[in-house]
Structures are given as C-alpha cells and as structure tokens.
Amino acid sequence: MPTTLYGEINNLEGIIDNVFATLKLADITLLITTITGILFYRLYYKNYYEIKSKVRKIVSLCILGVAIIIIGGLISIATIHWSTLEYKYVHPFKNSPTESIFKFGILYGTAMQYITNNKQDYDPKELIKLEPLFYEYEHCIECPSKNIILILVESLLSFPTYLEFNGIEITPTLNRLVKEGAYYNNNMTSVIQLGESSDGQFIYLNGLLPKKKGVTIYDYFDNTFESIPKILKKQNSKIECRMIIPTSSKMWRQDGVCIRYGFDKLYSRKEYLLENYNNNWLNDKQLFEYAMSIDQQSRQPFFSLILTSSTHSPYNKIFEEYAIPFPDTYSGELKNYLSNVHYMDKYLGKYLDSLKANHLYDNSLIIITSDHSISNDWLKSTEKDNVSFKIPLYIVNSPYAIDKESNYAISQADVFPTILDLAGIHSKWRGVGNSLLCPDSILNTKREKKRMIHKEQISDIILDSDYFKGKDITK
C-alpha cells in the first residue's frame, strides 16, 4: 500500500500480512540504519556536553539524519544489487513502484512512490486539440429503469470459471449464470496502476484511466468527476446510490470517495453489527449477508456497488475447508486462492438467491467483475498450471443481446460506457473506452480509431486540468 496513505485511520488493518509478504533483502536497511543511527547518536552525544542543550540536540539530530541517509543509501544500493540476482533481465530502476515493492522490498518501493508521486501539468493546446475526441458516439436505447448492482470481486481472474476437479466446480454460481444466458467475457485486460483496488473502482465508475505515476485517487482527490452515480441522478434524482465495503470507511479514503463520486450512502464494517465481531475486514459471507439486509430495506430503483475482500492476497489461509482434489503440482498459494474463489462464489450464489426471494433479481441489471488482476508473485503458479491473468466480466439480465464473443478483447475502461448503454443512460460523457454494444461500423471509423490511440492522453488531460469542474455535461 502506498505510504502516502499510511496516515489514514485503520488502513493497515487487514493487510498487515501483505506488508510482511513484501519484505525483501533490501529492507534489512531499515534495521541496520536504525541500529547504526542509535549507536552514532550515543557516541557523539557524549562529545557535546560542553555545548548548550538545545544546540547539542539540534547538531546531534542533524548528524543522525545525515548518517541514516548516507549509510542507508549505500546499504540499500548494495542489497538491491544482490536481490536482482533472483530476477534475471530485471533492472530495479526500470520497474513501476508496485513491481519494485514485489521484487526489491518496501524501502525501495516507497522511495519510488515519492519520486514518481506528483500531479502533472497539462498543455492547454493539447486540450484544445483533443477535446473533440472526449465524447464517444452515443448509441444507447430507451429501456425501463432497473436497479444496477455492480459487484467488484477482489483479484478475481478468468481462469477459475469452468475450472473443475473430479466434478467439483470452482465457480458453480458463475458457471450457472453463463449457462442461463448471462454475457461472459474472459478476456478483459486490467489497466490499474499503483492504486490497484482504488484504481479499479475509479475506472469503472468514471470511465477514465488512472495515472501511471502516483496514486490517482490520492493525487486527484479534489477533482470533479462525471461518475455513474452523478450521471444516474441527472436522469433520475430519486435513485439511491450506495456503496457497501468490507473495510473501514477510511480505507482508500472511501468515505471521501463516496462524496466525490456522488454516492448517497456508504456502508462499511463500522455499520455492520454482529455479536463477537472481531473488528477485522468483513469476509464475503458477512458482506453478502450485509448487502441482502440493505437491499430488503431500500427503495427502488437503486445503484449498489459491492466490494468483496476474501480473495485478497496474500494467499496463506482459506475461509472454509473444501475437499477439492487440486493437482499436487499446484502451489499452496494457488490452492488457497482457488479455495477462496470457491468460497466467494458460494456466498455470491446465496446473495443472488436472496435477490430472487425478494423479487429484485429480475428487475436488476447485475454486473460482476474483478477490481484488478494480480501478480504471479502471489500465486506462484507455473506454466503447466495454465493460469491466465486476464480478468472476467459477467452481465446478468442484459436488456439487449451482446454479440461479442467471450474471448473478445476488452479492457476495464470498456465497462463504464457498457453500463451506460445497458441502463439506457443518456450522457455526453461516456468515458475513454468502448461499449460492448457499440457496432463495428462505429468502432472502425477513423475518428474512433484515433480516439482509442489517444485515450490515455485524454484521461491524463481530463485529470490534470480538472476538466469537469464547472462544466454541465448533459444532453
């Protein structure tokens, strides 16, 4: 997790295992420089007895700071050098901050975060040049107002769908949805950056790409966004928009994000009341039960965003024991990951059953997808395991037939305009991606191809210029 967010309340709870899992040889610097600094201070402190107390302390602290920087820098460079022996063809200074944390430890990754974490300037001339490409052709059709339920499953990959061992399906609920006619795409590319989960949420809700430098939601927190909740409210002011999360309301600044994105309510673990609750992240069983109780009491139509957590890394534990005969060649981490996907799928099924029991299922557009892909550093899979790191998309109760094949190449940015189309939402702003309902006749036009080439630049300019501030983006 970016150290820029360490100060947020409760952020470390629930991911402390991740911190230990990413400690590498280079992080010995933290221990060595601390000991060296203390010894250095004690040694030189004795030589300053004749100097005034305040001056003595200031000089000592300056010497201590210089010593930590110099010694720490030398040790860090040395340990990073040795750590690269494990990663042939990998150069520490050419990796993203996230990759650096995985491969070279927290210290180096943190340094890279501070070096790259800055808000960028934009060229006004480029804004004028590209502004005609900001808006995609609208092709949604009028349809009855439905509830919209967007479920972001933590780190869900495509390959577990249809995967089975001796007749035991890893994702029986998701498999059933596809067999019953839900649209399924197994070839979606994750385009998150350092923000990871917050980036996935950012892409789906705003139709923009996250910045390659820094943490987007942190650096651009005060921006104005044209998000799905805001666009929905312009079309129907009575719609209720809510977010249900398994963590503290402070995690990834979700309390503030709700306001920035236009949500009415945030339901976090703080509001979840349960006897003997251990004050940790809500597991998927608790989360979906929580969502059930909220759905039953809410008015329609509503937009509900549900974030899960039980498939979060590191994969050193499982939530329920299952007699799944995994191949002996699978790593323990891969077995645990698939067991937790199976666990998520089980309680997802119970949640969908509750929607049916409460007569909400047929009147809801349900989109199930992953917040982001994951690194194989967590799964420790081999080529023989046939693990794909593409992420899936499932669309339940689509009002229109989607003729794209399941292996049709899409990215996370394509979900935003697809939701607008499926929900019949009119909006001038439609994101930088392409809707799955967009016909080839439009996709193959010169303008559309040009827009796709510049989509990253368009996102950057919109963020850097705070483009939507003071603008009325309506039809």
Image: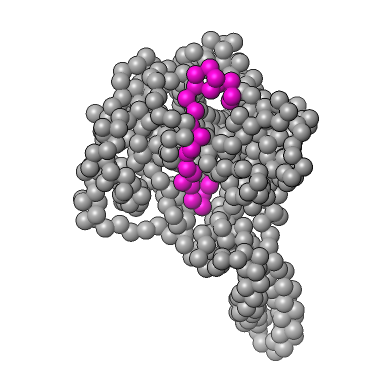
Left or right of 94, for residue 432: left
Q: Residue at x 74, y 45 (%)?
A: 329
157 and 466: which is toward the camera? 157
Give the residue drawn at x 75%, y 79%.
Answer: 39
Q: Nearer the viewer, residue 311 or 279?
A: 311
Q: Which residue is located at x 24 percent, y 54 percent?
A: 126
- Quadrant for residue 121, please give it: bottom left
Quadrant of the image occupied by residue 273: top right
Residue 289, horizontal then vertical, whole percent = 64, 23
Q: Magenta stretch: give its range.
A: 174-197
Q: Picture coordinates of residue 290 (x, y %)? A: 63, 24
Location of residue 88 with respect to 368 vertically, above or below: below
The answer to whether one can see residue 305 in this image is: no
Question: Is 351 situated above or below 383?
Answer: above
Of residues 252 and 167, the one drawn nearer to the viewer in this rendering? 167
Relative to 79, say whether 40 is above or below.
below
Residue 177 percent location from the top left of the image: 55, 21
* Along the line of sight, the residue nearer the viewer: 286 or 327: 327
Residue 416 seen in render: yes
**Looking at the image, is 320 positioned above or below residue 465?**
above
| Outermost residue toward the front in this view | 384
State how many labels appear. 0
Chosen colour scheme? one colour
Does the magenta-highlighted stretch encompass residue 135? no
Q: Residue 301: where, in percent of width, then height?
A: 44, 17
Identify the residue at horizontal 49%, vertical 51% (top origin): 193
Q: Is residue 411 left or right of residue 475?
A: right
Is 450 displayed left or right of 246 in the figure?
Answer: left
Is the C terminus in the top left, top right, bottom left or bottom right quadrant? top left
